[in-house]
Image (tube, rainbow, N blue to C red):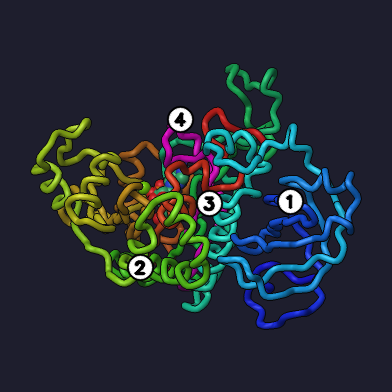
């Protein structure tokens, strides 16, 4: 069985073909039926022409949008505009009908809100088919980028006993009976009785474990699901998302920024080369100009500025922000958008953020105020990458953890990297769904992952 993607590219004609897929549209003339079939291999469908005499009236009636069919016929040049080939059907088997009365995907434009309610059927639309192919291609490109550079793919754990970001936005994992948990003599929940013998959570990042492997093997990366119980109903946050985290030994913040820049450029070039049709679709229907924009970004190195420079630019902005920026505050989305969309007019890497708004593990600068952090910001979305050089000095790291009320005993295994053969090292995390939003122009992060999990949303 050949797939439509192949058939649209082949030079062969008058060959016998068997095709299986789903009907997108059906048209009738007096003697003929025209079906457009999509099989998911590509955006375009293939037109099938069938003589009505070949098919019983009952089956003809069932050949509507959404029905699945198997067709045999001859591949011929198409006289119709906009398609190279079509199939002259010789026989058709109806595999499954989709009664028009209740099949939710009719041939009209559906809203994204509606499609989210039927996320189990939305992959049958052009948008979600294209999206699945783009996600697939970029996942492969991520592995290819790191593999070509000798990075090892490390499987970091999903269930964890420590909070990597120290931000306390974790989902708890337990087998205790939540209505009657085991309690100690003080009446507190007794986690000794829980599955792992201590409190456990879903991971917010694979970084700490990736650091362990980088500090033995050199360059590593992890690419897996990540969980955050952030109670934010934004178009950029999911409770379950995928993150790519490279970690590099003998690397400082400059090297980290170089790697992030190369990485994004590589991914953009890859997707432009491998999914041009799908990107053209997004360019036409979702966000005009995306393709041109990706092309220009893919060729240019990112601008780099410090947080302090960014703050100065924000303070001079010709209008008031909702949240007034001041040195020491975290960059809000409106700030990030101003910097990328109006000031730099493109992606930018912002580095050396105030220590107080960043995680405990970041390397401290000499100034005693900032850390060796960097975020990659892009127009429309703001942050897509967050990274840093890590503090490799045991005493400085312990001091910082104490200041932040973190239990150093719990992180002993992490501190051992600084006790034995410590080396400068750095890494970053790319939010995979934010990358997909950037590439496709889709506005809502719930529309770039097959089955979104967010506050109040866990259907399917
Ligand atoms: O900036 P973050 O929190 O960095 C880390 O987790 C580091 N441990 C990474 C590292 O250095 N290895 O998250 C990294 C990226 C963000 O820039 C963003 O793109 C994405 O992860 N992200 C989210 N994406 C979707 N939904 C959420 N709730 C996200 N939170 C972060
Ligand atoms: Mg961040």
Judge whether 359 appears above or below 250 on screen.
above
Residue at x 57%, y 45% (from the top left corner):
160
Query: Which residue is denoted by mark 2 in the rendering?
Result: 295
Asked if the magenta segment contains residue 167, the reply would be no
Mark pair 1, 2: CA separation:
42 Å
Q: Which mark is residue 276?
A: none
Residue found 49% across the figure and 70% down from its top: 216
Q: Which residues are magenta?
A: 218-244
Q: Tell me if 318 is positioned left or right of 289 in this view.
A: left
Task: Say what secondary structure mark 4 lies in.
Answer: loop
- Residue that badge 3 annotates: 242
Q: Which residue is mark 4?
A: 231
Along the line of sight, which residue is nearer the eye, 407 or 368? 368
**Of circles 2 and 4, which is in front?**
2
Q: Quadrant of the N terminus?
A: bottom right
Q: How far, Cα to Cα, is label 1 from label 4?
A: 52 Å
Residue at which label 1 appears: 28
Instruction: Give the vertical position of 297 relative to 129 (above or below).
Output: below
Tell me, yes or no, if residue 424 can be seen here.
Answer: no
Estimate the x, y position of residue 188 in percent, counting from the top left.
58, 21
The CB of the residue at mark 2 lies under 8 Å from ligand 1: no
Name the element at disc 2: helix
On whether ligand 1 comes within 8 Å of the CB at mark 4, the answer is no
Q: Residue at x 17, y 33 (%)?
A: 324
């Amino acid at each position: 069985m050949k797939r439509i993607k192949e058939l649209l590219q082949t030079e062969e004609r008058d060959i016998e073909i068997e095709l299986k897929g789903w009907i997108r549209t059906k048209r009738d003339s007096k003697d003929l039926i025209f079906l457009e079939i999509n099989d998911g291999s590509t955006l375009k469908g293939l037109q099938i022409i069938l003589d009505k005499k070949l098919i019983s009236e009952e089956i003809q009636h069932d050949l509507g949008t959404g029905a699945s069919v198997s067709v045999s016929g001859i591949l011929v040049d198409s006289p119709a505009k906009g398609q190279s080939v079509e199939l002259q059907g010789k026989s058709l088997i109806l595999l499954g009908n989709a009664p028009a009365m209740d099949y939710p995907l009719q041939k009209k434009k559906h809203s994204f809100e509606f499609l989210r309610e039927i996320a189990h059927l939305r992959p049958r639309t052009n948008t979600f088919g294209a999206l699945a192919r783009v996600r697939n291609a970029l996942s492969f490109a991520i592995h290819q980028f790191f593999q070509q550079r000798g990075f090892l793919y490390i499987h970091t754990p999903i269930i964890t006993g420590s909070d990597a970001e120290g931000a306390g936005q974790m989902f708890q994992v337990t087998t205790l009976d939540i209505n009657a948990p085991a309690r100690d003599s003080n009446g507190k929940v007794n986690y000794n009785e829980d599955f792992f013998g201590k409190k456990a959570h879903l991971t917010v990042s694979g970084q700490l474990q990736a650091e362990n492997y980088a500090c033995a093997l050199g360059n590593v990366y992890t690419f897996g699901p990540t969980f955050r119980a952030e109670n934010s109903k934004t178009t950029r946050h999911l409770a379950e998302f995928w993150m790519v985290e490279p970690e590099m030994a003998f690397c400082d913040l400059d090297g980290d920024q170089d790697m992030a820049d190369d990485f994004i450029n590589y991914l953009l070039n890859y997707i432009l080369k491998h999914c041009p049709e799908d990107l053209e679709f997004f360019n036409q229907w979702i966000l005009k100009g995306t393709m041109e924009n990706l092309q220009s970004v893919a060729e240019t190195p990112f601008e780099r500025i410090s947080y302090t420079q960014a703050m100065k630019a924000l303070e001079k902005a010709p209008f008031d922000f909702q949240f007034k920026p001041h040195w020491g505050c975290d960059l809000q989305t409106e700030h990030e958008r101003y910097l990328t969309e109006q000031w730099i007019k493109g992606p930018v890497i912002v580095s050396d953020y105030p220590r107080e708004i960043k995680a405990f593990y970041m390397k401290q600068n000499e100034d005693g105020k900032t850390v060796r952090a960097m975020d990659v910001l892009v127009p429309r979305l703001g942050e897509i990458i967050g990274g840093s050089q890590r503090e490799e000095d045991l005493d400085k790291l312990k001091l910082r953890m104490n200041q932040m009320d973190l239990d150093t005993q719990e992180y002993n295994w992490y501190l051992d990297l600084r006790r034995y053969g410590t080396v400068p090292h750095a890494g970053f995390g790319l939010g995979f769904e934010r990358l997909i939003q950037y590439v496709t122009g889709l506005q809502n992060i719930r529309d770039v992952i097959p089955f979104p999990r967010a506050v109040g949303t866990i259907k399917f």
